[in-house]
Image (cartoon, rainbow, N blue to C red):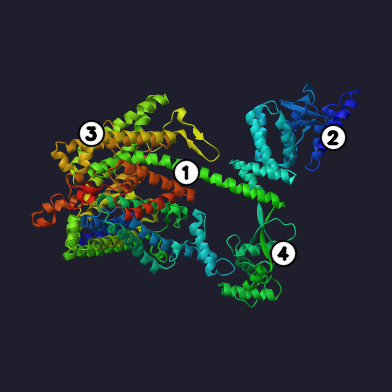
Amino acid sequence: MTWFLLALALVTLGATVLSQMGLGLISTSFVKTLGKTLCLCLVAVAMDVVWGYCGILSLGHMAFFGIGGYAIGQWLMYARTEIIVTESLRQSPLPPTEAEIVAAVGSQIFGVVGSSEFPWIWAFADNLLLQLLMVMLAPGLLALIFGWLAFRSRVTGVYLSILTQAMTLALSLWLFQNDSGLRGNNGLSGLQNIPGLDHLGQDLLSVLFLWASALALGGGYLLFAFVTSGRMGSVIRAIRDDEARLRFLGYQTEHYKLFVFTLTAMVSGLAGALYYPQAGIINPAELAPMASIYLAVWVAIGGRGRLYGAAIGAALVSLLSSWFTGGGAPPLDLGFHVIHWTDWWLVVLGLSFVAVTLFFPKGIGGLFDLIPARRPVPDRQGAFGPDRGARRREEGVPE
Amino acid sequence: MLRMIRLMLAVLAGLLSLPAAAQTLQDILQENPEAIAEPSRRTVGETLDRILASNLPEVPLFLERWRERAVYRRVSDGLFFYAEETEDGYLLFDISTGAPAGGAGRREISALIPNAGVRGAIATALIEFQLSDPDPARRAAALTAITRDPSADHLDPLRESIAAETDPVLKARKERLERILTARFDADPAARIAAISALGHDTGLESRSVLNQILAASPQVAAAIPEGENVARILEPGGADLSREAAYALLVAEGLAPPVPTAQDIRNALVAAIGEGRLPDLDPSSLDSDAARAAAYDRLVAAGSAPPRVTDEAIDAALEAHVFWLGYAEPDPAVTEAARATLDRSLTRVALYQTADIGLDALSLASIYFLAAIGLAITFGVMGVINMAHGEFIMIGAYTAYCVQRVIPDQTLSLAVALPLAFAVAFAAGVAMERLVIRRLSRRPLETLLATFGISIALQQIAKNIFGTQARPLTAPSWLSGSLTLNDVVSISHIRIAIFVLALIFLALLLVVLRRSRLGLEIRAVTQNPGMAASMGIDPDRINMLTFGLGSGIAGIAGVAIGLYAQVTSEMGANYIVQSFMAVVVGGVGNVWGTLAGATLIGGLQKLIEWFNPSNTLAAQTYMILFIIIFIQFRPRGIVALRGRAAGV
């Protein structure tokens, strides 16, 4: 844990020094990429807690991430448009009334979907504090309701995964509609401009966001390290390994699962709220079920059941992905066929994912176990990796 | 009638003048050439009557050319000609005989350019001829023209033409059209009511639209309802049909109440007043709220330079003092009553047909989901693994069919080859995947899910690299391209029927395999208890492999079916996979009937929600998924749950 936090601080400080101080060795866009990667690490750590520790393969955490992004995006877009509108109305002969400003902001924001009215979902958009609360509350509430329904009726294993995927799909389809009130497939844009902080410039803003992301990741890491240690952590791991037995011992496993599910959803929302101002735009495609599956891929490659593994997996795979798909990697000439990585990266990723699940169930994090001093305590790590809990018995098929 | 008399008089006159030279069309036109050259909507009726009265055979051609702006007038003597443009002028043709009548320079003749209104009148006159035209196609075209733009003038010519109609199809169309026109335009209310009642047996769009036109009504307002008004119903301002604002706007429009200055009006008045210096002591920057603006505006009102604001009490009083009602444009209450009754009856029938249509749609969607989901259900039932790459087997089947179509041009033959080949290719891919990946991950279902997802990404991207991102068409044989149409409401395309039949065939096939064959017995044994099955000498690995191949093969067949009515893309599988999961989860695992029930429920539900909210398929899917999440609450193991020892814990 100490090592992880030290490395995090080192990366953040290093990037700050290299990009500021008049050296300019690192471009603003790279600082943004770093900041975004830290946010992805945070959501991956949350995913690791819910999947690697608690055994719930949730295919919905990227949706919570997106909800957080939408929540902060609403305020960013509203406040910025309000500034622009007020500026332009200053030229008019009469000073604008509040109703006129709201109407003008509405027609600015919703013009693309042929509307000018503010939907109910924007009720708090003018209030930064409330909207910041929504960043955590909206995903938390959704996770609470969904988790309560699902855990109560003892939906487990792959059933639960499919159900969370269905939830994610429903959410993204709903957002794709023009009358959802969140600008349909246009999404929210211009989020990189922080209202009131325009004078700072993007290079300074990017560093500020890098710091915020690093703080959030560090805080989240500490929080989850606390949750997964001690008695609570033992119960959570026991749910993963044999939920039925734990229930027979008198534990209310549903409550623990609901707690973990909701807490990780709220942290995912926070990560999203830090990610999208750096990305600048959010649209419903970001919430598609595919994104949540990729999140599971990162965690699996990084190594489940250890928080640093998830963070390493997310950082490595997302950085590699943007390097390969962004055309950064040189094409590989095989003689009979030239491999362009933009075309073939997904194939490599998919197959390497299969290889990791087949041959290295512990992922990259498993490499740390090779350090002799760090051998894990045997009774907490199963022979098949940490996923033995979700066994066939849970799906109604006896072994 | 008048026209008939005039016609007879004209014929009489023609007979009388027979000893002299027969009157030609040119002579008739020359009686009042200005009416032809410079016609107006008002005078053209009389001119047309005169021309029609001549009964000359060349009249239809002349009217047609006139309408098409192909009649010219020679400037020198005012005679009318048809003309053909040549390199250095025009060739003229006589309008009576069509014989060449010399040439003319560009400036020696001028084209007649009747305006749109006149051309409409000419077209109406022409329809009379077209309805009795020897060419059935032109008669049909005339009927279509009347249907598109019906008017009272068409009624008499239409009735006259029915008796002589020889084509039974056209005759039926004419009679139907005659009923529709009678219902709307006949002078005799009894005839209209009879025609309206007769329309009740007709579910066509035109008959419903004519009834709606008869029932056209608009909100009206007055201090009291005037005598002889055909009232549909009394409206309550602020009720569901008439909002308070709309009611007051109606009063304003009728001049019964002063308009309410809107916020925009107040703003404009203030801007104008400040600009003209009428409010010198006012600081414009203080006008940043509605209250401040209202106060300033009231000063303008007091000065008499703006209309007063209207208070809510005044609006209420004005609404109170008047009666609002929905009034029919049609004055005769008997006619509107008959139309209302007929429309209600006809709408009931239409609703029934629509239900049938939705049922057919739902059935065809359900058969697609069934084909896509059944393979998933079998593998999940037997092996307890979710195959995320199932959608990609659908895609493999579709691309196989596409490749076969490229090789074999004959579409029927290529389809016959593609179906078994798609099965074989997908079967092989499934077996390979089971042996290479899934077998090694047995007892770790969550990891299997993720590993198959990795395969799914890779397969999708490979397909994209090979076939490109654009959609590839899979052409159905021509005998599958039509559709079965019962009436205006119910129709279903042949492809959907074929897919339905395909689904039925595979349902029967699977039932036979699972119930009657040795393989089916072993599959059922492994599904219920793999350990016990193994100790009875069944090799579970072999059964797993074959089951997986079978499920994948059927997905390949589903791919061909989907490709035939949608298009083949690398993402086509992903579009169906979630619905397939839903069908499996809702239906219950490892059971053919369960999957059938699940697919039917999902398909039916999706169509039903689409029907409630037809503009929005996205919303339909959203609501359907929400429904499923709630459904799982009550039946966590699906509709058809395995019971007894097979159900496990």
Q: Nearer the viewer, mark 3 or mark 2?
A: 3
Per the rendering, the mark at residue B224 is 4
Quarter of image, res A49: bottom left
Q: Earlier in the sequence, mark 2 or mark 1?
A: 2
Circle 3 is placed at which residue position? B519
* In this view, B451 is above or below B122: below
Report the chain holding disc 2: B
Parent chain of label 1? B
Amino acid of disc 3? Leu
Gap in angstroms between the C-alphas marked 4 and 1: 47 Å
In which image quadrant can residue B63 be found? top right
Q: Which mark is residue B358?
A: 1
Residue B597, percent across and down? 35, 44
Query: Do discs 4 and 1 belong to a common subunit?
Result: yes
- Type of amino acid under label 4: Ala
Tell me the CA gap for discs 4 and 3.
Answer: 84 Å
Residue holding disc 2: B6
SS under mark 1: helix
Upstream in sequence: badge 4 or badge 3 = 4
Q: Residues within 10 Å of mark 1 (few under 14, many from 20)?
A: some
Q: Considering only order in the chain, which callout, 1 or 3, is on the residue closer to the N terminus? A: 1
| Chain to which the residue tagged by mark 4 belongs | B
Q: Nearer the viewer, residue B591 or A394?
A: B591
Foreground: disc 4 or disc 2: 4
Tell me the number on the disc at residue B575: none
